[in-house]
Image (cartoon, coloured by chain):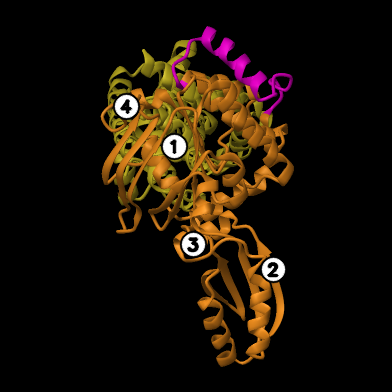
Chain colours: A orange, B yellow
Amino acid sequence: MTAAIQIEELVKVYKGGIRAVDKVSLEVEEQEIFGFLGPNGAGKSTTIKCVIGLLRPTAGRILIGGTDARQNPKLVKRMIGYASQETAIDDRLSGWQNLSLQGRFFHLTRKEIAKRGEEVLHLCGLWERRNDSAGTYSGGMLKRLDIAAALIHQPRVLFLDEPTLGLDVQTRKVIWEYIQKLRTEQRMTIFLTTHYMEEADVLCNRLGIIDRGKIMAIGAPGALKAQIGGDIISARFVAPDERVSVLVKAISALPETASVTAMGEGLQRIVARQRGDQLIPEVFALAARSEVSVESIRLHRPSLDDVYLHFTGREMRDEQGSREDTRKTRMTQRRMRR
Amino acid sequence: MTFLSDVWYVAWRELVVFVRTPVRIIMTVIQPLIWLGLMGNMMQGMMRGPGLDQILGTSNYLTFMTPGIILMTVLFGGAFSGMSIVWDRRTGYLEKLLAAPISRAAIPFGKAFAASVQAGVQILIIAAIALALGVHFATGVLGLVVILLIAMCFSLILSSLSLCLAARIKSPETLMAVVNFLTMPLMFASTALFPKEAMPGWLATVATYNPVTYAVNAIRHLTVSGWNWLAIASSLGILAGLTIAVLTLSRFLFQRATAE
């Protein structure tokens, strides 16, 4: 069986010489929710835009259901649905008008639009509000309508670029449930990008971690977390530097310790090989011996933040996008919060 | 056929919004009313003198000015249609259009067509106001239809030009500045408001080659003197040629625009 999405060695170099996407390869199976996790500017949106034909890739191959996206762009466009992070709904039109216009752009007949439009509106729970102006919708409703519009032509694969950008926590959960429902009830394959760790963790069957245009790791969230080892202890030591470094050396030498990383401001990140609770007393004992006082100590299971840090060597921070991008993002956030 | 349907649905979106915004429609009535009622009457007083009838071709400055006002409304209306692209780019709607399997050329064509239909509505309103103010159209209803045709054709040119600019210009401020920079000289270095005979030599030369002059002369013939077939045919020919040229350019730009 062919994969729903197959990306091979995709490269995108922008005019200024910036390598936004650098040899990205991945496969997404049918009925899978695949998440692309990374900070803004990591190359997530660029990848999606290459797939849906908004950008011309510098090199590489993209296959949707086995069809080459560059050789058959019109065919592939019919096979995919796309909801951009800006939520491209025209506020001045009604929900139904937005939807039917989208159907028209996919060359559906009036009959098809009437039938399919009703289906997707029931699916996103906006059937009763269909004749209201989209300007009166809340952020969550707009997002649901936008995703519904992307489904009007019954695509095989759905691309969602930052589906919950700018939404509040409750609304975000509603959108997650909605996306889950699309997979289970509509048997959709979904490819989404996000820079929310929680979203990637809860929603995605598999993840690709992307940083500066390169894929650093691919796997199920659980498997990725298991890869970095056992529990994590974050400890803050207070003492002169040389004494702390003696202590850190001693902790690193323990058989239960996988690694110790300095996080700055006296904070040390100790990754245990397995269980961290047994490591804590030893850390205290060693600290007492090196005359270092422990200001705080915290034990936690590895989260996706740790996974991200592990594979990219840094915490997830937003890269600077272009001015226009920043403005766009800000506008989206403002719009979605209403 | 699919192409025409693509163009129609791009235009449909603009037109629904136009109809839904009563303020915009009211403003399109008020503006020419001010120009005709205020400027027209003021200039009527100023431009009184022997031999003026010969220059204007009519003793009524309002009659002379009506074609100018028609063109001006079309010019400014069309020139800003590029803004809808800038706005669509910002809201992500442009991306949505580009991701759909429609022909990319349908985007500027549809928007230009919508601008031209809006121009048509505005012209009818202006004509009605002009008639109420006592302007007499020499060629009657049939002439008015031809006037409508010329002005809508001119609107296609201007809006396509503006859309071409918007294919490249991403910020509304820059687009506004560029459009203003282009429309003002186009308007005033033409015979829209003043006869060529009243201009200094160099300006008259500029006005001769200004496309606005071609459009306004044809309309003026139809309004003031009657069926001057040669003048009408030549300006229609030039306008048609320009329309095709600008539409082709916009097609080219939009096919490339976001596929870099």
Q: Chain of mark 1?
A: B
Q: Where residue B17 sits in the image (x, y, percent)?
A: 60, 27
> Where A113 falls versus B10 (above or below)?
above
Which of the 4 quarters of the picture holds residue B34? Answer: top right
Q: Amino acid at mark 3?
A: His
* Quadrant housing the C terminus of chain B: top left
Which of the 4 quarters of the picture holds residue A137? Answer: top right
Mark 4 surroundings within 10 Å by alpha-carbon count, few (fewer than 14), some (14 through 19), many (20 or more): some
Q: CA distance from mark 3 to mark 4?
A: 34 Å
**Mark 4 and 1 residues: CB-CB less than 8 Å, in contact?**
no
Same subunit, labels 4 and 2: the answer reads yes
**B163 or A170, which is in the foreground?**
A170
Q: Which type of secondary structure does the marked residue at label 4 adopt?
A: loop
Q: Chain of mark 4?
A: A
Between disc 4 and disc 2, whose residue precedes? 4
Identity of the residue drawn at 32% across and 23% down? B236
Residue range of the region highlighted in magenta in the rendering:
A105-133
In the picture of the structure, the residue carrying the numbered disc 1 is B192
Foreground mark, 1 or 3?
A: 3
Foreground mark, 2 or 3?
A: 2
**A261 or A141, which is in the foreground?**
A261
> Where A276 falls versus A63 (above or below)?
below
Q: CA distance from mark 4 to mark 2?
A: 48 Å
Same subunit, labels 1 and 3: the answer reads no
A172 horizontally vs A71: left or right: right
In the picture of the structure, the residue carrying the numbered disc 2 is A298
Q: Amino acid at mark 1?
A: Ala
In the picture of the structure, the residue carrying the numbered disc 3 is A310
Q: Where residue A243 sits in the image (x, y, percent)?
A: 59, 91
Q: Is residue B88 magenta?
A: no
Q: CA distance from mark 4 to mark 1?
A: 60 Å
* Quadrant housing the N terminus of chain B: top left
